Image (tube, rainbow, N blue to C red):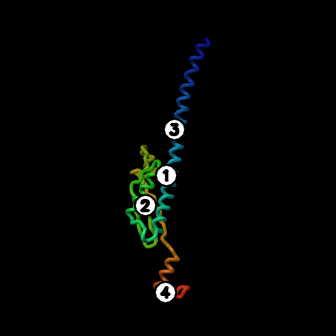
Amino acid sequence: MKTIIRMKKTGYYTVEATFIVTICIVILMAILYTGLYVHDRIIIEAVTSRQTSFWIHQDEDEKWNEEEFTDELKNDLDRKLFLFTVNHVDVDEMIIIKTVNVRYSIPISLGFLKRIWGGNDGARTECISVSEVRPAKWKWDADAIKGEKNDQGTME
């Protein structure tokens, strides 16, 4: 009699463990993927802002041209990102503001999630604008153009 009862109970544990382990693995993968997604979004914004500020405020004789800057930024992002793939880096230059557009793709195989997070093609664009305003340098340039003298009495 005891052997019949034992045989009936053993099957329940196997079925329950299958469902519980499967659900736990899916939840764990969702948490890990979300963490990597947030990491990559923060890295794209931080690295792009830092590199753009560095590029704008370089000395004129050592300043990178636009192609060197975009290549350096793309390489730096490729080294630091876990999930995203950088497709294209573009720079829009205006008088005092430079806008850097980083287009990246999100590797998602589920169609509805791809459309929600990245549009129809699964790609998004991050835009970072950095101002090139240097009031002290502009004042100095304006004084030199006007022909005003500095504290030492010389023309600048």
Give neighbour class at mark 1: few <14, some 14-19, many 20+ (Cα, 10 Å).
Answer: some
From this view, report whether residue 3 is shown above or below residue 114.
above
Closer to the eye: label 4 or 3: 4
Residue behind mark 1: 40
**C-alpha separation, residue under disc 1 versus residue under disc 3:** 21 Å
Secondary structure of the residue carrying numbered label 4: loop
Query: Of callouts 1 and 4, which one flags the residue occurring earlier in the amino acid sequence?
Result: 1
**C-alpha separation, residue under disc 1 versus residue under disc 4:** 51 Å
Residue behind mark 4: 155
Closer to the eye: label 1 or 4: 4
| Residue found 47% across the figure and 87% down from its top | 146
* Residue 75 percent across, percent down from the top left: 42, 55
Would you say the residues marked 2 and 1 are in contact, meaning their CB atoms lie under 8 Å apart? no
Query: Of callouts 4 and 2, which one flags the residue occurring earlier in the amino acid sequence?
Result: 2
Q: Amino acid at mark 1?
A: Asp
Residue behind mark 3: 26
Q: Nearer the viewer, residue 9 or 149?
A: 149
Quadrant that contains the N terminus: top right
Residue behind mark 2: 101
Closer to the eye: label 2 or 3: 2
From this view, report whether residue 120 is shown above or below residue 65.
above
Closer to the eye: label 4 or 2: 4
Would you say the residues marked 2 and 3 are in contact, meaning their CB atoms lie under 8 Å apart? no
From this view, report whether residue 108 is shown above or below residue 134.
above
Secondary structure of the residue carrying numbered label 3: helix
Q: Nearer the viewer, residue 7 or 82?
A: 82
**C-alpha separation, residue under disc 2 versus residue under disc 1:** 16 Å
Q: Residue furthest left?
A: 67
Q: Amino acid at mark 3?
A: Val
Secondary structure of the residue carrying numbered label 1: helix
Which image quarter: residue 61? bottom left
* Residue 87 percent across, percent down from the top left: 39, 54
